[in-house]
Amino acid sequence: MSGLASLPREILGEIFLYADLQCRKELRLTCGTLATIGKGWVFRDTVVSLEDESYNRLENILADPSLVQCVTTVCLNVSKWNEEDVDYDEQSEHGDEAAEWSALPERFRALFHRLGELPRLQGVSLCFDEACADSDDWHIQVPQSQAFRSVVLRKLMTLLVSLPQLPQGLTLHNLHNINESEESAVADITQVLGALRSLRLNIVHQEDGNDDFDFDSTNPHEFFTALPSFWLNPAASNLEHLTIYSNLFYGFFPKLNLQGVHFPRLKSLAFGNYEFVHDSQLDWILSHGSTLTQLYLDNCHILFEVAIDCPEKTYLEPRVFERREGLPSQDRWASYGTRWHHYFRAFNEGLPLLRKFGFGCTSWLDLDHAHGNATTLTLGMGEECYAVFNDAYGPPYPLDSHMKYMTSIEGSEDQEYRDEAPLIPSEEDRQALGDLYRRIGQPFSPDMTYDLEEMVIGSHWS
């Protein structure tokens, strides 16, 4: 161990950087040199959850002048909070802002307001429960109402703008797809966004067991339409890291149009559950070629065929749609001819600074992200990387591997489904992907996993 301790401090710092929290703690116990260097790494990221252990940890840190200098990132985790366990005061009502806030444990509220005592605080994350409802009429039972989420988010933004220095990193995990509309709340959010270098949005939408209802409800469409102006444009000038994940596929429908947003300093970009259906989406990524060094596409699809009864609400111009025999009379059909090998070659040529690339799939929603559990992206081209969108004959969700048409049965007045062939990744796709990895010098083999903890979860601001 003395040999390890004799290494330059820069190398020892790199060792702590790539070690998990438990290893960092054990390394600190080996000798005085590693104890000194490792202190900052052990106490760098702090979680404040609704548990005595986390309360005690932060209180002890705040009481120690040397430890308080170590904390740069705080995760406020209220994901386990269940309003059903709260008995609201007779003088207040559920949904009232003061009542919603005061219902949280007193120790949590006290420590929340003491975050300003952390002089080196640079990143903040807020984690809600993943289940949400589009309104507070309780027709769908969820642990946390929209009123509760709104109050906590407003309190956080008010706190952040009061700090001596605005944070440079913000992660909102399980952000419900309803934006704040109250003027002062919007002003606080806009001010916080303007100082950010890192923004990670993990967005959740109402689920009630009926995928079609989830998909066709109003909120997802309003949220993604407003996302560029509400969340991205205020941060555009300084932002270096952007992550957008959603538990509902988005891009085509609900429509997300990023063409009006440009990030002159963007270094890393991650999309989860994003749909590509037009070359302008590829062009938007390539427009950041002078700065982009990391790109992650997690469970993203190319939609090679789409059929929908409301083309005016999609990413595509209505004029590109046409009628197609075998589809319902109200549906319109369109196709997209660009393939993944076109994308990979474009990244290879148009992103000269790219050094890290992840293309694959991970079940990020199934993990406890707020506590820093590792999330891994399984690299490679699965058959699901090409898909069709068909809102008439979905399974029931409109995304499927192939298009379905109705056709007449010979000699009968009845009709039956006719399944078109799915689009399977080609050898050309795989070759172009391998060429991209080789060019950037990143090891690659099918089923290799890639650690996405920093990118997707945002356990640290940078």
Image (spheres, rainbow, N blue to C red):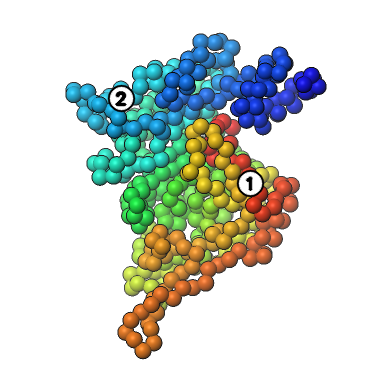
Quadrant of the rendering where the N terminus is positioned: top right
For the point 39% across and 67% down, the residue is 393
Q: Nearer the viewer, residue 165 or 380?
A: 380
Tell me if label 2 and label 1 are in contact, CB under 8 Å: no
Residue 98 percent coordinates (x, y): 28, 24
Amino acid, disc 1: Thr
CA–CA distance in space, label 2 to label 1: 42 Å
Q: Name the residue under label 1.
A: 449
- Is 58 above or below relative to 438? above
The quarter of the displayed image where residue 191 is located: top left
Q: Residue furthest bottom?
A: 411
Element type where label 2 sits in the image:
loop
Quadrant of the rendering where the C terminus is positioned: top right
Amino acid, disc 2: Ala
The quarter of the displayed image where residue 85 is located: top left
For the point 44% across and 47% down, the residue is 247
Q: Residue 413: in sight, yes or no?
A: yes
Q: Residue furthest left?
A: 90
For the point 43% across and 71% down, the residue is 404
Q: Residue 264: in sight, yes or no?
A: no
Q: Mark 2 points at which residue?
A: 103
For the point 64% across and 25% down, the residue is 24
